[in-house]
Amino acid sequence: MSKSKIQNLAYMISSGNLSKSKELFGGANLIIQTNDVRDEYKNHLERYPQDILVFTDYAAELSWLVFELQNIFRDSDYANSKMLNYISVGESINYGLENNWNITAIMLTVIIDCLDSSF
């Protein structure tokens, strides 16, 4: 992965410059949705227990982050860094949400966790 791309992403987030995705992320066993559709997923884990579900008012921002990380990891020059661990990303997001972290802290933690798991 390009070190400068991940640094730029972290700097953008720490500066409070958060973008929003027009599309919410769903795939690779990670689903990010808004809180208002939580009931629609009530029985989802019965059929798909491997999925990580994230419900938050920051669904568009967190989806943007996942898409950005996906692009950075996809363009990686390092063979062991080609895959983004989406389950780990979802678990990190949910941990931050459960502990009432602010959106910036959650996003930066996700980036750190991705870096730790890719080397």
Image: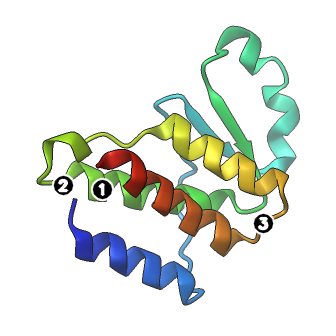
Res 17 seen here: no
Q: Residues within 10 Å of mark 1 (few under 14, many from 20)?
A: some
Q: What residue lies at 75% left-to-right and 71% top-to-bottom?
A: 102
Name the residue carrying label 3. Answer: 101
Residue nearest the viewer, comparing 85 with 66:
85
Query: How far across and down, in percent of the image, does residue 77 sit?
Result: 11, 54
Amino acid type at mark 2: Asp
Looking at this rendering, what residue extends furthest in the bottom direction?
A: 15
Is 57 or 13 nearer to us in this picture? 13
User: Label 1 vs label 2: CA separation?
Assistant: 6 Å
Whether residue 48 is visible: yes
Per the image, label 1 sits on a secondary structure element best described as: helix
Cα–Cα span, label 2 and label 3: 30 Å
Q: Label 1, on which residue?
A: 71
Is 90 rendered above or below residue 112?
Answer: above
Give the quarter of the image for residue 10: bottom left
Residue 98, image x and y in percent?
A: 83, 51
Task: Report the side of 115 relative to 107 (left or right).
Answer: left
Relative to 14, does residue 96 appear above or below in the rendering? above
- What type is the residue that disc 1 sits on? Asn
- Mark 1 touching mark 2, by CB under 8 A? yes
Crowdedness near tag 2: few (<14), some (14–19) or many (≥20) residues, C-alpha within 10 Å? few
